[in-house]
Image (cartoon, rainbow, N blue to C red):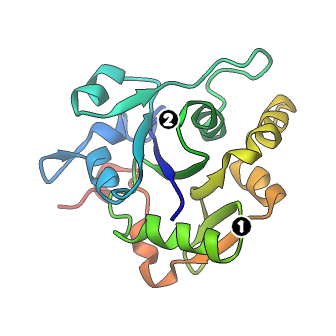
Amino acid sequence: MLKISAIILCGGKSRRMGQDKGLMAINNQAMVSHVAKGLSGAQEILLNCNQHVEQYQALGFETFTDKEYGDIEANAGPLLGILSAMETAKHDWLLFSPCDTPDIPADYLKVMAQHASDQLAFACVVFDGQRQQHLHVLLHKRYKESLMMYLLSGRRRTSEWLNSIKPIEVDFSQQAAAFANINALEDLPA
């Protein structure tokens, strides 16, 4: 089995919600804690967060912030978090999930790792039956240079960079709702 570092991306500004989504409570637990449960089985779980670092650490998580790369602008979006994770994580394989998807399937890590192993792939992305879920991705650190060059070119689109490395799609269409993002207060479970 692959040795995997799971990375929860909490680096956004939460403009639509008006507060840090990862820290919002669902059933008396921070949303990020629900995401972490879905990543159990990873050799390490890290949070990429650029705000409220102390609050995330108080929940028991190991955190890291976006790194500074001379010519790459700060706050360059989730790709900067992914690049920073490639430099921070202990293991060569990184499984990503955004902090606002609290219902990821319990077998997410296992299925993604199995597809990478079976198909000798170094990049796998979730396909929900309609589209790729670009922040639900398993990547090998071998793509660090490619990502660095992409960001240095001034581009920021996750889908564009991922398509350039040609990930295999992992079909989660039977569990598509599990990858729905919580982007507004009305999206929170009652």
**Picture residue at 60% right of the left edge, 40% below the top:** 78
Left or right: residue 125 versus residue 162 is left
Left or right: residue 111 versus residue 177 is right
**Mark 2 touches mark 1? (CB < 8 Å):** no
**Picture residue at 38% right of the left edge, 56% below the top:** 39
Disc 1 marks a residue whose amino acid type is Ala
Left or right: residue 89 versus residue 28 is right
Disc 2 marks a residue whose amino acid type is Gly
Please give the count of numbered marks on the rendered protein: 2
Of the two numbered discs 2 and 1 on the same chain, state the one appearing first in sequence.
Answer: 2
Q: Is residue 10 above or below residue 188?
A: above
Q: Is residue 164 visible?
A: yes
Q: Is residue 19 visible?
A: no
Q: Is residue 59 above or below residue 130?
A: above
Q: Position of residue 141 (x, y in %)?
A: 68, 45
Q: Position of residue 9 (x, y in %)?
A: 48, 42
Q: Secondary structure at mark 2?
A: loop
**Picture residue at 50% right of the left edge, 24% below the top:** 65
Between the residue at mark 2 and the residue at mark 1, the CA separation in whole angstroms equals: 29 Å
Spot the residue most to the left.
28
Q: Which is closer to the viewer, label 2 or label 1?
A: 1
Q: Position of residue 129 (x, y in %)?
A: 57, 81
Spot the residue most to the top.
70
Q: Secondary structure at mark 1?
A: loop
Crowd around label 2: few <14 · some 14–19 · many ≥20 (10 Å): many
Q: Which mark is residue 12?
A: 2
The C terminus is located in which quarter?
Answer: bottom left
**In the figure, residue 128 lies in which quadrant?**
bottom right
Q: Which residue is mark 1?
A: 121
